[in-house]
Every structure is written in C-alpha cells, then in structure tokens.
Image: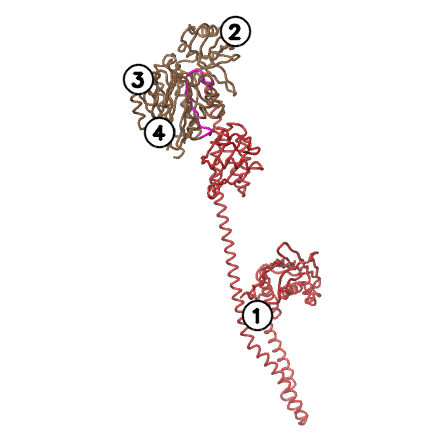
Chain colours: A red, B brown
Amino acid sequence: MKPDESLLDKLHQLQIKNRELEQVHLLQTLILDGLHVILTTDDIDALFAQFFGLLHQALHFDAAIMTQLSKDQTQLLPVSCTESDSIGALSIVQHIHQKGMERPLNAFHIPLLFDEPLSLASPWAEMHSLLGIDIRTQFADYQLWIFSSQRAAFGPHDLTLLQQFSSFAGSTISQVEKRRLQEQQKELQARQDQIEKVLMSSEKMASLGQMAAGVAHEINNPLSYVLSNIQNLAYNHEQLHQLIDALKQAVSVDKAQSILDHFRYQAICVDTDDIMAEMTEGATRVKDIVKSLRQFSHPDKSKVDDINLAELIDNTLRVAWNQIKYSAQVEKNYGTQNIVVTARSAQLSQVLLNILVNAAQACDDNRGLIQITLCEDKDNAYIEIKDNGCGIPEDTLNKIFDPFFTTKAVGKGTGLGLAISKAIIEQHSGNIQVTSQLNQGTSFMIMLPKQADLSNDDTDGYL
Amino acid sequence: MFAIDSHHINASSTTEAAEQFKQLLANNNRQFLIGFCEASLLKALPDDLNLTSPCLLASSCLGSANEQQLSLQKHSISVLRFSDKAGFYGVASSQEATNVRSAAANTLLSAMKKSGRGHLSPQLIWCFQTPGQEEQVLLGIQDIVGTKVPVFGGSSADNSIEGQWGLHDGNQKLSEGFIIAVLYPSVPVLGYFGSGYELTGLSGTVTKVTGRKLQKIDGQPAVDIINTWRKQRGHATFEDGNVLAASTMTPLARLESSSDIPLLLLSHPAMASNGCLDLFSEVHEGETLHLASGTKDQLIERGPQVIQTARDIAELRGMLPLQGAIIIFCGGCMLAIQNAMAEVQAAMKAELPDLPFIMGFTFGEQGTFSDGESRHGNLMISCTLFGGDLET
C-alpha cells in the first residue's frame, strides 16, 4: 500500500474510532452526571426532570416526557415533562403503549404510527421523531420519551446511547431505592421502638394509677378512723383537762397542785396538745396525699364546656397570686383573638395552677418573670408558660412527669402535681412538653385541641 | 437466540445448482435470507422460491464465496440464513425505472410494514439494485429515514457487462429495479466501507455530463483528457469499447469533504465511445474529477484490512463475539485480481475465524463512509458485521 492511500485510510479509521470514543465519553459523562443527580435528588419527579437536562448534552431534542406504567399495566401515567402541557405527549405514548409497540423504539415520523391522525396541541403536533426507552427500577417501570420536531432526527447511535444510559439509570435508581427503603425501615423500626417504649410507659403509668387507687383506698379507711379517733381523743383530752381543773377546785389546791406537779401535769398537757396537733397535721397530710393519689387515678370529672383560655388563666392567676407575687412578675401575651377550647375548666385550671406555682417556686427571689403566651392554629390552641427561674437539670428533666418525682424538700410536695397535669392534658387529647436550661429558666408548652372529644371519655386517669 | 449460518452451492450446470438451492430452501424456518448468485444461475432459479421469510438475492460477477469456498467461473450461490425470532426483517422490491427516488421511498415503507415494525427506524437498511439508479434509490431511502440509518448494499452484476444482471426477492426475479431490506436484528450491527486508491494529482472539471455519460472535462472530450492523464502515468490509452478492466487501477474520483478528512468517491469507467465515458456512478457538471490510482497489491490487501477495521470498531462498541458478516467486493476489483481471490478469501477468513460470511462481487457499492453518510460508489469494499447476542 502506498503511503498516501494508507495514511488516508488510517485517517478514516481514526475518524470512525474517534466518533466511537466520543460516544463512549459522552456515555461516561452522562453516567457520571446521572449518578450525581441520582445521589443528590430524593424526589423521583425532580430526578427525572434533571435527567432531561443531562440528556440535552448528548442528544438534540425538543421535548421529553417521563411516564410510569400503572399498576394494572394499562396506562402510562405522567411523571415529569419538559413542557407545561403534557397532554399531547401522553396521547402519543399512550397510543403507542396500547398498540403494544415494544421499546426501545425509534420512530422517524410520528404521524405514521397512527392509523388516523391525532388531534394534538402545540408543541406536540409539530413533533416528528420519537425515541422511547424503558427504565426499569426495582419498584416501578418508567418510560423515557424523547421528541424532535425534525423528521428522522434520531439514528441507531442515539438509541444505543439512550439504552445504555437508561440501563445504568434503572439499576442505579434501584440501588438507591433499596438503600432508601432500608433507611426507611430503620426509621420505622426506631419509631416502633419509641412507640413500644411509650406503650410500656403508659402501661407502667396505668399500673401505677391502679396501684395508687388501691393504695388510696386501703389507706383511706384506716386513715378515716385515725383522724376520727384523733378528734375523739382531742375531745376526750379536753374533757379530762376540764375534769382535773374541776378536781383542783374540789380538793385542797396546794395538795392537788403538789400532786399535779408531781406528775408534771402541766407539761403533759402541753406535750399532749403538741402530739395531738402533730398527729392531726400528719394525718391531714396523709389525707392530702390520698386525695392526690385518687385524683391521679380518677381525675375529677367537671363539666365539659367551651372555655376562654385567657379568662381561665386570669382566674387561675388570681388563685395562685399569693404564691406568685413575692417571687415573680407575670407578663401575659394573649393576642387579640379569644381562644376557646372545649375542655373541663376545673381540670385545666388545676394544670395551670400546678405549673404557675412551680414557676413561682423556681424564681423565688422577687426578680422572676413568668411569661404566659397564648396562640392557636386551625385545630389547636397553645399555652406557653415560661419562667426565668433556676431551671431543671438535664438528668431530671425527663422524669418530671413521673408520679412521685419531686425535687422539693421532703413534705413540701407529693410529686404528683405534674403527673396529674400530664394525665389531664392527655385526657383532653393534647400534650404537654417541657424545655429547660439550668439557671436560665423553664418553659412548658401545652397543646390542646380546640374540639377535644370528651363526650365518650371513660378513661379515668391512667386506668 | 440469534444465529447465522452460511451455505455455498456450486455446480457446472445451472440446473444442478438450482436444484441444490431448492433443497437448501426446503423446510426453511429462518427469519431472513440474503445471498449472491452468479447471473446465469439467478436466471435459472424459479420465480417463486416458496419462502415464508424475507429473502433477497443479487447477481454477482463470475460467482460468489462464503467462508468455506470461493467459486468463480462456476454457477454458484452463497447465502446467509438468519435465525432470529426476536428480530424483525422485511423486504420489498420495485421495478420502477423512471421515478426511482419516489419508488424507493415507497418500497422502503413497504419493507418496514412487512417487517412488523411499522414505521420505526431500522438498525440497518440493505439494498440490492440493478446498475444505473443507485443514487436515486439512496435518496429515496433517505427521504424517509434521514441520513442517520446506515445503508449498505451492492449493484447486481453479470460476468461481462452485458446487462445480464438480475435480482430475486423470493417471489420474483427482477432484471431491472431494486430490492430494499430493513433489518431490526436482536443483535447489534455495523458496517465499514473502504477502498484502496489514492489521488495522482491529475484532475479536471466536469463541463458536460448526461446522467452517467461523461462527455467533457475542461471543455474537451472526456476520453481525450483522461487518455492524456493516463499517458502521463504510463498507462495505455482507452479505445472505444469495454474499458472496465483497463480502468480498474485508474478510476476517476471525486473528493467529498463533509469533514476535515477528504473522502475519495470513486467512479469506474465502463465503456468508451466517441470521446464519452459511461460510468458506474453519477458525476455532476462543475465537479472536479481526479485520476485515482491503485495497484493489485493494494486491492489484495484491502479486503482483509476493511474487515480488520470493522472488527476493531465492533470491539470498541462492545459487539464481540461476532456472529457473521456480509462482504461486498467490487466486481471490477475482483476481475483485476481474479487469480489472487483465493488468497483474499483466505485472508478474510483469517480475519473472521470460525464465523460464517458470504461475499459477492458487484458493479457498484453502497455503504456508510467514515463521516457517517451513506453513499453510492465504485471500486469499494464493504464489511457488515453482526455482533454478539444481547440475550446472552
């Protein structure tokens, strides 16, 4: 072979090989960019919309649509489209699907695909060429349709490129879908674990409620006769005292006084009065605890009514004012609208009282500030009670709604106030949440449905 | 499952060869059949080959070959049979001689319809035609499917340029016209088109031409100008009559330059008379015609090289392992190196080890050049390869 002819032939070979390599490079670029898009886009619609942009680098086309095969496999449903009006494209591809034309598909003149002319709106009426390809993922069958207004716009190379890209896209999306599914499964598992924890906690609370009711019942009976007997004993003691005074009048005063002194009568009387007072106080306290326990398990069923929350809070504040006024100022942000909820006012008032008194006690230095904010959305009302008091340590924050948990000195609190409050709010289908920062303050956020269904409420506390 | 098998029949009489061919076609259950047949044998074949599958045959100069045998000067036929139930194939023909372009467009649409793929672009279009209207057939095809679908094929040939060429579409024989096949195989396919010629530096402008009859170059009788060039290159001058063999090593060429790399589009002079030359392809007034030059060695080497290049491209496209090939070898070139054709066939077999292929010798070749455009040319060699089964 002479050099000129040989060189020219080599050039032709290189030209073809170069075009093949360009095709490979184009595919690699598409795959790399496609991978980036797949990995960074969660939404499948947005993903396919970005695919159109990518494909413009490799193919000259005027419009495109991505469809998904319906579950009964009879319909192609639109997923994403380059045009705002996809009806025309859907008519074309639906027709192709119904005619059972297999993909990959390279149509050089769309009107020839149909026995009768289709009535299509712009720009679909002007489209002549169509490439159709399947993208199969693990969970769905998609179809990518590329349109050109030029007749016979696409060649075998274009179809091959699209086939290779769709094959990559299908398998990669499947992998990503699988990974996302695994993540969702993990998330669901975590949620299930959380629900199980809550259920266990609820069961624990219900058991506690039952126990509290039982204990209250068991203590209440002996306590009744202890209290009754203390009263009787006090009465008897008073009678005895009067008897001895009368005897002192009847016998020699000196002699009687001597005997009384000998038996330390006066000291016994004082001591007995003290004992009686302490017994009364102790028994009364036991009575209060029993009352709280009963309330924890059987909150009072006051009347269900439409309640103006601002009024309720003001009324509660008046009750608690003696305990608040020396510790903190109260700032109210009720807004302009009346916020009304359907609720049991006595129960809600009890909740508010608990939180307000706690807030006052947390401030306790006359420089405290208690901010009460009311707001609402379409379905719910929100009450925020925020103080700038001592705050709650992080390790105890998650225990404050537990029954009998208290940070107060022994005898200063039963540890049932917030547990009862939580029970009441949950009975109203609401929730109560707390956030706190040590030495910064504490915030309670109560959410109440505006229309809680309390008509069939037969749950008693945690029972 | 895609499979190709090749068959070669030769016999001393057309009757015997035709009978053997008939037996080969009995109980045919293939999806597609294509072949080359020595011209007199083609005439001896029955009009109806009783085939249910699409089929096209073209007459081939002196004979034909497959990977096993080369038969020249014998009544031979070489066919490739395609088993491809997942593929689609369609064939249609036309004997239209005047409005060829339009007829080609309609014939293509008819072939597509018959294939069952409606109006979808095929992977490959194959055309066989009698010499004379190849450019119009190509234009008609491209009117329908554009220029991106590769078109390969050849012009039927006889043994001595006496117009004894013909075609067979399975249902009828055509002494004039064309057959178009559309291929949607289940495997990838590619073709490569090359020649073995170079420019001599001698050229002139076509100043008068009628169809394929070249009358004047630079205002002078075409034969006179070309004879001047031939003298300068040490070749014998043309006398009136058949110049096909004499011009094989010195054809005319046009430079196509749709890309940066020049393409030689060759025209083979066939007959000289009264200062005019009958060509096997069209040239147009105003075009520059070059005297091209080749050697027997170039022609002998070129066939296997075309196959090697096609294989390289197939490897780049990931088409391996290959399943078979159709080779078109210019009949004029074959006549020039007739004694070396066994060597050429063996070298081709070495490039396509254990693969079935057939080779025909045509009077005009169609194929896709390196710039991606399909054209009609002369003195060309093409190799069309069918790649690995996508299902496996």
Measured Cα–Cα span from mark 3 to mark 4 = 25 Å
Q: Are marks 1 and 3 in contact (CB under 8 Å)?
A: no
Q: Amino acid at mark 2?
A: Gly
Residue A338 falls left or right of residue A211: right
Q: Amino acid at mark 3?
A: Thr
Residue wearing tag 4: B30
* Other-residue count near label 4 (Cα within 10 Å), few / some / many at <14 / 14–19 / ≥20: some
Q: Give the total of numbered labels.
A: 4
Circle 4 SS class: loop
| Residue B4 drawn above or below residue A180 | above
Measured Cα–Cα span from mark 2 to mark 3 = 48 Å
Task: Pick the residue in front: A114 or A38.
Answer: A114
Which is more N-terminal, label 4 or label 3? Answer: 3
| Residue A205 drawn above or below residue B126 | below
Q: Is residue B127 in the magenta section? A: yes
Residue B80, quarter of picture: top left
Q: Residue at x 54, y 43 (%)?
A: A43
Circle 1 SS class: helix
Regarding residue A402, the answer to whether it shows in the image is yes
| Residue B177 drawn above or below residue B242 | below
Q: Are marks 2 and 3 on the same chain?
A: yes
Residue wearing tag 1: A294
